[in-house]
Amino acid sequence: MPKRTLDPLPSAAFQILLALAGDELHGYAIMRQVAEQTGNRIRLGPGTLYSSIRVLLENGLIEESSAREDADSADERRRYYRISSAGLGLARTEAKRLADVLRVARSKKILRGRYV
Amino acid sequence: MSEKLYAFFLRLYPAHFRQEYGDEALQLFRDRARDERGFFPRLRLWFDLFFDVTVSLPREYLHLPAPRTVPSALRRLPGIPAFYVLQDEPVRPGALFFGGVLSCVALTTCWAALNQIHRPETPNASSPRGPSYGAAAPRHSDSSSSRRRFSAYRSNRSFAPTQPLGDSERKRIISSVADTLKQHYVNRAAAQKTADTFLVREKRGEYDDISDSAMLAAVMTDELRDATGDRNLTLDYFSSPLPQQASAQLPEVRAQYRNAMKQQNCTFEKVELLPHNIGYLKLNSFPDPEVCRVAAMAAMTYVNHADAVIFDLRDNRGGNPEMVQLLGSYLFDHPEYWYNPRETTTEASWTHSPIEGNNLADKPIFVLTSKTTASGAEQFAYDLKMLKRATLVGETTAGAAHSGIFYRLDDHFGMGIPEVKAINPYSANDWAEAGVEPDTKVSATNALDVALKLAKNKLQKK
């Protein structure tokens, strides 16, 4: 069976990379961060979240970090993830690609609203 | 509850996913469930989860990781089998095809084997008569449901073990079964052959695995029936000790019976004339004519001038065949062959019709039945139905023909053995096991109302 590829980068994987760009997070924190950064449009379910994490780990885009000293006892059992330099590079490339897309969209005047 | 449900969903994922992320996924669910309380947040949570399962589950199966084979297993040495870890290996189409073919072959074999074990039975089967009237004996196991071989019994978990059986005791019972069969069974040649087979099998140790009394009874019953083709042969096990002689013959039991019949008006619960001059007899057993002949005659005399008669046998579990025949005699104006599965055809097989002064021979007759109407009551209903003499209203009856004669082997074992081969002039099978089908099928509770309506209509048409 074909192995999952990251070209093009799936939206969920990109959002996870963005979420981890700020801090090391565990699964639930990643889910919340993604929900926050997308205005609650993307709420990653456990299946999608962990299958994306697995693919990102396999491709060396994120890494599992060792246990955190400041975590409470419940958090000690959780696995934390952080973005790798390769992941940061890919996220940057993807952001640029989206920025190019955005520039084209602007030039075509298909976007309205102050946020663009 | 909701966590269990989600844990069930997780089980649908491939093993590698569950092993690696199962706990974390469950933890994430717990976190969300903790934080998202209230109706709408909870609804959204479940919507997210269903959507997530629907999307991610096929993807996980589509992108299963490569099989993790142990490197040492790849170095195959000639002549030494190698084993691979296949747990997460994607299933090849070829393997699926061969698996399908293999499953079909296995299922067909099982089906054929089961058919061999559980052969179709002739419907003319019945249970034995108990030590006293009809179904009165406390039967430990219902022989009608115990028709599988020992192997099948052994694998059946619902078969409750009863009294343990020692080797010498088992040998004694088998030998006793063989002797009793030879002595009493109507077909002497078959009896001899079957008895010899039992003794040979016993010597070969084929019954050595049976260490339970009820199981021995069930297995032997099967073998008796298979060997002779006679469904009325049974070996029964009774958990409570059987009396030394047939209880009905004991003087104190006879006295008790006489007394009870006197108090219960010989089980004629109601003898009435209903509106439209319809006679109604609610009879809850067919008592021994030696004790109840006068009561029976008085009841029949009471309804003698009715325009139609309803016999209510809904609570009747049977009784004495002579009483069945006596009451039947009132319903004909000439002697009619009266089938009784326990008797050979003799002069006594005919009804005693006509009975002097009787007016009921040409009156419409209705018999009310229920699913507990049994034995002699079924004989009454069956014979009248077959002779087209009565309209049966109610439910299909219990299907207890009790055509074997009961023989006590010891304190706990007894055999039902037909001593005669009765001729059924009406049809190939009587009511044994199948029961008697009513002409008008209604629930037992409504049977009287329906019968009254039918009787009224019939009388109005006249």
Image (cartoon, coloured by chain):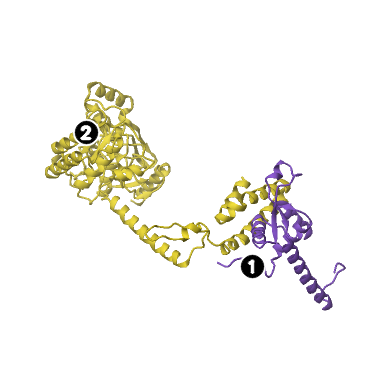
Chain colours: A purple, B yellow
**Which numbered disc, 1 or 2, marks the residue closer to the eye?**
1
> Which amino acid type corresponds to the residue marked 2 in the rendered image?
Ile
Q: Residues within 10 Å of mark 2 (few under 14, many from 20)?
A: some
Closest to the observer: B18 or A90? A90
Q: Quadrant of the N terminus of chain A?
A: bottom right
Residue B339 placement: quadrant: top left
Element on which disc 1 rests: loop
Query: Residue A5 shows which numbered tag?
Result: 1
| Image mark 1: chain | A
**Which residue ends up furthest to the right in the rendered image?**
A114
Q: Nearer the viewer, residue B40 or B85?
A: B85
User: Looking at the image, which residue sits at the far left?
Assistant: B189
Q: Residue furthest bottom?
A: A108
Quarter of the picture containing the C terminus of chain A is bottom right
Q: Is residue B353 visible?
A: no
The type of residue carrying mark 1 is Thr
The percent coordinates of residue B4 (x first, y second) are 60, 46
Q: Toward which corner of the image does residue B220 lie, by quadrant?
A: top left
Percent of width and height locating residue B349: 17, 41
Q: Which mark is residue B173?
A: 2
Determine the chain carrying the residue at label 2: B
For the residues labelled 1 and 2, the Cα–Cα distance comes to: 75 Å
Query: Do marks 1 and 2 share a chain?
Result: no
State the residue in front, A116 or B329: A116
**Whether residue A84 is situated above or below residue A104 in the rendered picture:** above
